[in-house]
Amino acid sequence: MAEVIHDLRSLLEHERELLLDGNLEAVGQLGAAKEQCLEALGGCEDRAPLRHLADQLERNQRLLESAQAGVRAARARLALVEHVRRELNIYKADGRRAIRRSIGQLETKL
């Protein structure tokens, strides 16, 4: 059992490093190994050594949630940039709104 706990601690520390480096693809590849370790711990009677593992799991979960929030924010920002690239709202000298759809095209709105 001690070997499984050691292996899982090592995996969780490696996962933490990958999360901090932003290497989400490699984080996903650790899933099967983590699952195997957790299944092996399922029958563990002594819960004391598992408390530290729970702390590591929670820490990594918070990092993963932060990474996901960062990815969502980046996607939203890219969507906004793409929208501006495709369609830029501007105003003419007379105050009417015009939408610039692409370079050279201008559509006037009332």
Image (tube, rainbow, N blue to C red):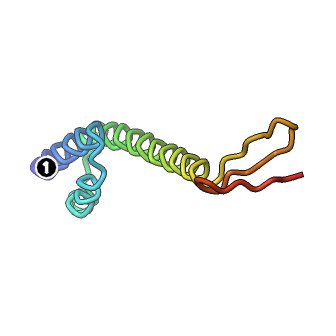
Q: Nearer the viewer, residue 36 or 106?
A: 106
Relative to 94, does residue 7 appear above or below in the rendering? below
User: Is 14 on the left or on the right of 102, as rendered?
Assistant: left
Q: Position of residue 47 (x, y in %)?
A: 29, 44
Give the residue at x 19% y 43%. Answer: 14
Q: Nearer the viewer, residue 31 or 110?
A: 110
Q: How many marks?
A: 1
Give the residue at x 58% y 53%. Answer: 103
Q: Nearer the viewer, residue 90 or 57?
A: 90
Q: Nearer the viewer, residue 98 or 86?
A: 98
Q: Position of residue 104 (x, y in %)?
A: 62, 54
Q: Label 1 belongs to which residue?
A: 7
User: Is 95 on the left or on the right of 62, as rendered?
Assistant: right
Judged from the image, the secondary structure of the residue bearing numbered disc 1 is helix
Relative to 44, does residue 52 appear above or below in the rendering? above
Q: Position of residue 25 (x, y in %)?
A: 28, 55
Classify 10 Å Cα crowding around label 1: few (below 14), some (14-19), many (20 and above). some
Relative to 30, does residue 76 appear above or below in the rendering? above
Q: Amino acid at mark 1?
A: Asp
Report the residue that reaches farthest toward the left: 3
Question: Which quadrant of the view contains residue 17?
Answer: top left
User: Is 106 on the left or on the right of 31, as rendered?
Assistant: right
Give the residue at x 52% y 43%. Answer: 73
Give the residue at x 21% y 40%. Answer: 13
Q: Position of residue 60 (x, y in %)?
A: 34, 41
